[in-house]
Amino acid sequence: MQEYKQIPITRDEIVPTALRMRHDGVQLVMIHAFVQTDGQMRISWDYAVDPVVESYYVLGEERVPSIVDIYDEAARWPELELHELLGIDFEGLDTSKRLFLPEDLLETQGKGQILVTPLSELVEKRDEVLADRQRKEEDK
């Protein structure tokens, strides 16, 4: 099993870290992010430094530099995805076109915050809509 090492960095260390990794021939494995339970955004850049995956992460940032100029397409797709889904602003990234979500899908107009709704809430909302439809039918 491959070891996974987590290393906190500042936003100012993102580009120098990527440059060092690229210079050393290290593969960018993934860029990912999530909102922690305390509300802070956590953005991580994972590199395959055999035999370890080194995950460099920043906390509380929603605007960070892009590393597309360093890692090309390996960085472009995950940066666009995180911009679209979580509203993270990758400085220097061309976000003029949506990656995969329709422009009108989100109330936030593509500024992120795709939230997971518990099934119980969805069932409750569905039941409310059905009850409202039934009331309207009865009023006719």
Image (spheres, rainbow, N blue to C red):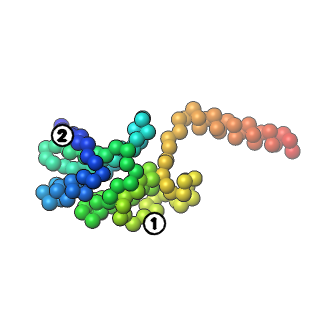
Q: Residues within 10 Å of mark 1 (few under 14, many from 20)?
A: few
Q: Quadrant of residue 24?
A: bottom left
Which dot marks residue 97? 1
Q: Position of residue 6 (x, y in %)?
A: 24, 40
Residue placed farthest to the top in the image? 120
Q: Quadrant of the N terminus?
A: top left
Secondary structure beneath dot 1 equals loop
Q: Name the residue under label 2.
A: 2
Picture residue at 50% right of the left edge, 57% below the top: 110
Q: Where is residue 8 in the image (x, y as percent from the top left)?
A: 26, 43
Q: In which quarter of the image is the C terminus?
A: top right
Q: Position of residue 54 (x, y in %)?
A: 20, 45
Cα distance between the residues tagged 2 and 1: 37 Å
Picture residue at 31% right of the left edge, 46% below the top: 58
Is residue 83 in view from this perspective? yes
Q: How crowded is mark 2: few (under 14 residues within 10 Å), some or many (20 or more)?
A: few
Picture residue at 25% right of the left edge, 61% below the top: 71
Q: Position of residue 75 (x, y in %)?
A: 30, 59
Q: Quadrant of residue 134?
A: top right
Dot in front, 2 or 1: 1
Could you tell whether 111 is left or right of 131 in the image? Answer: left
Secondary structure beneath dot 2 equals loop
Q: Is residue 107 above or below residue 3?
A: below
- Of residues 34 and 2, the one nearer the viewer is 34
Q: What residue type is labelled 2?
A: Gln
Which dot marks residue 6? none
